[in-house]
Image (cartoon, rainbow, N blue to C red):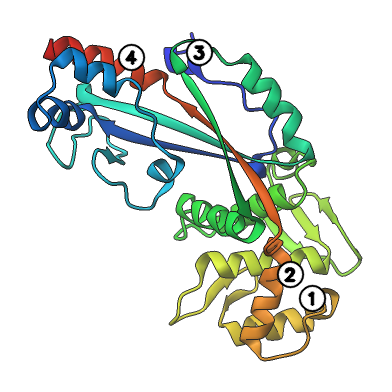
Amino acid sequence: MPTAAKKRDIDLSEFPPGALATYTRLVCLACIFDLFTEQLGLAPRTAYSEIKRHAPSPPDLTAHKPARPYFDSVEKHPRCPSCDAAKRWHARFTLHRVEGSKLTDAPRRALVKSLPKSDDQFQISDAKSTRRAVFFEWLDATGRSLDFADEGWLVAATRAYLERAEPKTDWAEVFDGLRSVRRSQRLAEGWQRDGARLFLAPALYGDALLVQYLLSRSHAHGGVTLEGRLTLRELVRRLRQIGYLEARGATQGDEFEILENLIEQLTGGDEPVKLHYILDRRDFLEKVKTVYAHYA
């Protein structure tokens, strides 16, 4: 039988994976109630009324390092790093971010319409950004989800990029049982699967190499790609050899200028994009009631 958590999941299957990001973060209710009742001197009932209206901003849930009372933990029974409160004092916020586009606008409106409206269980907000900023946020989140000690991360990174580049394709099916990704000598554009191998046209293959380099680069040793570990100079030389620089019109300048040019094209630069946030407060509202019962 499905668990209660599974029953509570909202259906996000209509969204292309590359256009959707989900963030979760714990909040310590012991820290919050102590602030309101001890430091501010509010009665438990008044504190409860104030706290249950709380809704974190997107940066509260997406920042690298959470600030008190928020924290991250992968432990089964975590404790608050600030006050050492046990799991029963913790609530979880879940934030879904959808990139606005023709592919996502209709399913997003349908999803928002279907969500319960009582008690502000879900809160909706929008923000403006740029394609470049969103790309690097995606790159950062993708990097944190990969195991760079496992060589399979190169295939996983390629799939993650293709899901962004061509969101209409069912990449889960394409990558099912896939063992390797290679540059095609025959394709002028697009991709083709042959057995357990996926062949990418030179331009698409070059995009994948660039993404892999950006994900894994370090100042001392360069970045790991399907072509091996490459310094920036070696990466640019390899991209030139496969015709990628010419295809992208990025043949002039030194390697740093070429890299910046390629990144501008890969990301979309300063083109504006609208971000839509869906904040799930259901777990928070339930836990606030439980904690209030203790204080009351």
Amino acid type, callout 1: Tyr
Of 40 and 199, the residue lying toward us: 40
Residue 118: percent from the left, percent from the top?
48, 10
Amino acid type, callout 3: Lys
Q: Which residue is mark 4?
A: 286
Amino acid type, callout 2: Gly
**Where the C terminus falls, by quadrant?**
top left
Residues at marks 1 and 4 touching, judged by CB atoms closer than 8 Å: no
Q: How much space separates mark 1 and mark 2, taking CA atoms?
A: 6 Å
Q: How much space separates mark 3 and mark 2, taking CA atoms?
A: 42 Å
Of 267 and 269, the residue lying toward us: 269
Task: Identify the disc placed on residue 7.
Answer: 3
Kind of element beneath mark 4? helix
- In primary-sequence order, the first of circles 1 and 2 is 2
Q: Is residue 276 above or below residue 157?
A: above
- Which of discs 1 and 4 lies nearer the camera? The answer is 4
